[in-house]
Image: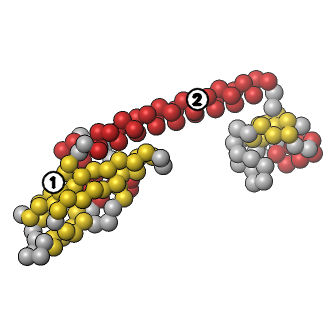
Amino acid sequence: MRVVLKQEVRGLGRPGDVKDVADGYAQNFLLPRGLAIVASTSELKRVAQQRDSVAHKAERAHAEAEALAKKLDAVTLVFKLKAGEQGKAFGSITTKDVSDALQREARIKVDRMKIHADPLRTLGVHRVEIRLLTDVRAHVTVAIEPA
């Protein structure tokens, strides 16, 4: 029997997959538990449309992330911290500080969880990585000056 999975079934597949399974397995396990539905022609068309829609949304999100990455690469943030004689700052610049400064100065909202950097504790220029998507990354220049 041919079925379309509605939920992930271990060892069988993911939602939206079309699988050929034994009649008994479908009738006694998958269908009663709502894990799958019978693969009719209308259901197969609906699954195909859903896959196209998901692919289109992912493509659009990827394009938007790449455009945002280009904007972020051009941004330079300047922070002022009190510093000692050897150039070591009293305090640090955290991912939250970077996120707040991006929103305040560049009008770009970035979740602080996407910013991957240790707290910056030394004076100078640093490059901070921002992971917008798994394959789209941007770098923001952070300059820390003595106050």
Contact between marks 2 and 1 (CB within 8 A): the answer is no
Q: Inspect the image, locate mark 1, and give the three-letter code of the amino acid beneath it.
A: Val
Q: Which mark is residue 53?
A: 2
Q: Nearer the viewer, residue 6 or 99?
A: 99
Answer above or below: position of 87 versus 64.
Answer: below
Answer above or below: position of 125 versus 54.
Answer: below
**Residue at (38% x, 53% y) in the render:** 114
Q: Inspect the image, locate mark 2, and give the three-letter code of the amino acid beneath it.
A: Ser
Label 1 crowd bin: few (<14), some (14–19), many (20+), radius 10 Å: some
Q: Position of residue 90 (x, y in %)?
A: 15, 72
Answer above or below: position of 25 versus 63.
Answer: below
Label 1, secondary structure: give it.
strand
Answer above or below: position of 50 versus 19.
Answer: above
Q: Nearer the viewer, residue 54 or 27?
A: 54
Q: Position of residue 137 (x, y in %)?
A: 40, 48
Q: Position of residue 19 (x, y in %)?
A: 81, 40
Regarding residue 100, the answer to whether it shows in the image is no
Label 2, secondary structure: give it.
helix
**Residue at (8% x, 64% y) in the render:** 146
Decide if residue 19 is on the left or right side of residue 57.
right
Regarding residue 30, the answer to whether it shows in the image is yes
Which residue position holds label 1?
78
User: Residues under labels 2 and 1: Cα distance?
Assistant: 42 Å
Decide if residue 115 is on the left or right side of residue 146.
right
* Quarter of the N terminus within the rendering: top right
Number of numbered discs on residues: 2
Mark nearest the camera among 2 and 1 is 1
* Quarter of the C terminus within the rendering: bottom left
**Residue at (22% x, 63% y) in the render:** 93
